[in-house]
Each structure stands twice: as structure tokens, then as C-alpha cells.
């Protein structure tokens, strides 16, 4: 049985007239008659009652016509999905992120899914392992702090930002618009471990060394939100990137600019071997979102 035979029979079942069905299919009646005969022989059932005046569907013919329509609709749907997947309009992307980048990731995902609602997004917290998971193919694209050890990956810079200092709203330094490195060094500090972001960690400590200060690190905490909870509880101050600070307002924590802060970058990284069309659409969308603002 061939798909074209199903198409022929559907046309005939709707026209109930061989000549009109053949005209609809853009060929002559004899080939249509032969194809329907072959279909009946293959099925071993009579699909039509034929008289000199009319053509009627048998019970078997009506049942077969209904199923044939569903089959052809599924075939058309499958072809459409394949075409959409080829253009990246459907598919699945795994995005790697760290808690410090949740605000950026949320903005990117919202923009992308508004444009391409049929691409399924999975978000994976990959703190400390982002680059390796991208290389292994377990993450399609990762939001990362830059610079980073991204050899062999494609990297697109999205944002340039600076460090800010998180503190309880009632802390004495909250009255200041910005915090100097001397004031920061004189406080207990909650910092992320070096393996989470080696370059960012070295930037913060390097700033202290530049001004001949030693940072008093009382705790190192991977999770940004836990750091903010500890800041709220008065355990110490925390240095974070300004984009990470934005979703945390209103939690009893305020942010003040760190004076002479080095500039840090946030970007996306992905493997050049990843041929996903959806990935290309995502990277184009994210670059347009952040680089145009």
C-alpha cells in the first residue's frame, strides 16, 4: 500500500464519482480505477459499491476512508515538524547556568520562548562544571563569567558589568553610595569559592592586593541565594556582580557600588560541533537582546 493510493481513495470517497475524482487529482479516470482496484485486492475487501449510475462506500470503505484521512494528516504533520526542526523552530535546548546568572538567564529565556514557543528549554544548574558539560555535549549553551578557560568553544560576550557590595539594609555602610576597598576589607566577607569562578575570585582578591589590603573572608558559599540569606542574617558582606543583584532587592539586602571595581564580563559559550538549528536561533536571539540594549 502506498500513500498515493490513500490520497486517491480519499478523493474518490469525497467525490463518489470516478471522473470528478480523477479531475481533482489531475489525471485520467482509467489509472484511478486501476489504483483503487489494486488497493481493494491488497486489502482483501470491497471498498465501493459500483453501479452504472453511482458509486457508494461500503462499511469497510467508510471505515478505511476515516483512517486514511488521519494517516495523511499525521504524515503532513510529520513533514511540517521536520521542516520546522530543520529551521530550528522546534527542538530541545539544555541551558547551563549558575545562580549568579539567574536574572540574565530568565530574561534570555523569556525573550526566546516568546519568539519560538515550540522549542523546549531545560535549565540546568551547573555551578563549577559549566565548561566541561558544554564540551561533553550535556549542555547546549552555558551562561558563563568571562574570562574563562573556554578553549575549543565559541564564546559570545553579552554584558560588561562591575562588582557591587551586598549588605543588610540597616548596616552602617548602607548610608554610603559606594564602598571603598578599605571599608570592604574591614568587614567580615562572604565570598564564593574559587572553583566556582576562578577569574572573578582572583579579581576581587587582586583588587585588595592592589591597595595592600587583605579581605577578611569568614565563609565561602557556592550558592548565591544562601550568601544573601547570610548577609540578611548579619554574617557579613558579599561581593557580587551587579546583574546578580537585581532580582534580590526587597529581601532585606541592599547593594552599593564597589569603588574602582574591575570590569567583568558575562557571556554564553557553546561547542562549534553542536549543529542544532535551535541553538543558532537562541544565540542570535540572546545577542540581539543584550547587545542592542
Image (spheres, rainbow, N blue to C red):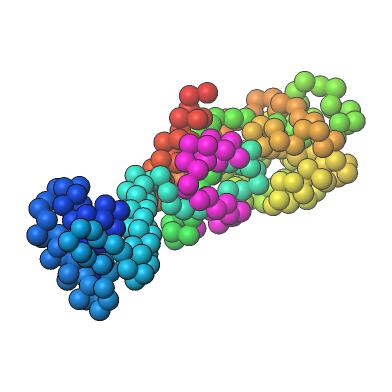
The answer to whether residue 178 of the structure is visible from this angle is yes
Relative to 181, say whether 75 is above or below. Answer: below
The location of residue 240, given as percent across then percent down, is 69, 37
The location of residue 257, given as percent across then percent down, is 71, 26
Nearest the eye: 158 or 32: 32
Nearest the eye: 115 or 94: 115
At horizontal 55% and vertical 53% (from top left) the residue drawn is: 122
For residue 158: magenta?
A: no
Relative to 71, say whether 210 is above or below. Answer: above
- In the picture, measured across the screen, residue 58 lies left or right of residue 164, that is left
Quadrant of the image occupied by residue 241:
top right
The answer to whether residue 157 of the structure is visible from this angle is no
Nearest the eye: 101 or 194: 101
For residue 121: magenta?
A: yes
- In the picture, measured across the screen, residue 181 lies left or right of residue 118, that is right
- In the picture, measured across the screen, residue 129 lies left or right of residue 225, that is left
What range of the chain is rendered magenta? 106-133
At horizontal 50% and vertical 51% (from top left) the residue drawn is: 120
Residue farthest bottom in this picture = 44
At horizontal 42% and vertical 49% (from top left) the residue drawn is: 90
At horizontal 75% and vertical 23% (from top left) the residue drawn is: 178
Relative to 176, say whether 29 is above or below. Answer: below
Amino acid at each position: 500500500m502506498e500513500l498515493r493510493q490513500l490520497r486517491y481513495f480519499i478523493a474518490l470517497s469525497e467525490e463518489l464519482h470516478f471522473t470528478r475524482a480523477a479531475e481533482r487529482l489531475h489525471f485520467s479516470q482509467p489509472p484511478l480505477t486501476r489504483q483503487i482496484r489494486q488497493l481493494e485486492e491488497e486489502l482483501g475487501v470491497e471498498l465501493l459499491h459500483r453501479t452504472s449510475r453511482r458509486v457508494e462506500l461500503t462499511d469497510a470503505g467508510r471505515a478505511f476512508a476515516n483512517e486514511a484521512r488521519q494517516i495523511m494528516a499525521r504524515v503532513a504533520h510529520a513533514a511540517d515538524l521536520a521542516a520546522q526542526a530543520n529551521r530550528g523552530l522546534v527542538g530541545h535546548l539544555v541551558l547551563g547556568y549558575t545562580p549568579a546568572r539567574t536574572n540574565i538567564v530568565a530574561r534570555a529565556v523569556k525573550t526566546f520562548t516568546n519568539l519560538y514557543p515550540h522549542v523546549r528549554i531545560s535549565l540546568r544548574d551547573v555551578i563549577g562544571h559549566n565548561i566541561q558539560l558544554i564540551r561533553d555535549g550535556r549542555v547546549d549553551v552555558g551562561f558563563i563569567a568571562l574570562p574563562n578557560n573556554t578553549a575549543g568553544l565559541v564564546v559570545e560576550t553579552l554584558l560588561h558589568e562591575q562588582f557591587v557590595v551586598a549588605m543588610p539594609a540597616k548596616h552602617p555602610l548602607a548610608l554610603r553610595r559606594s564602598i571603598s576597598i578599605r571599608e570592604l576589607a574591614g568587614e567580615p566577607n562572604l565570598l564564593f569559592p574559587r572553583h566556582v569562578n576562578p577569574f572573578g575570585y582572583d579579581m576581587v582578591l587582586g583588587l585588595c592586593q592592589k591597595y595592600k589590603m587583605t579581605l577578611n573572608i569568614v565563609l565561602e558559599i557556592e550558592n548565591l541565594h544562601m550568601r544573601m540569606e547570610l548577609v540578611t542574617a548579619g554574617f557579613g558582606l558579599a561581593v557580587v556582580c551587579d546583574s546578580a543583584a537585581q532580582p534580590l532587592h526587597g529581601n532585606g539586602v541592599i547593594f552599593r557600588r564597589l569603588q574602582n571595581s574591575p570590569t567583568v564580563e558575562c557571556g554564553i559559550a557553546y561547542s562549534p560541533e553542536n549543529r542544532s538549528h535551535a541553538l543558532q536561533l537562541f544565540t542570535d536571539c540572546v545577542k540581539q537582546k543584550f547587545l542592542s540594549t
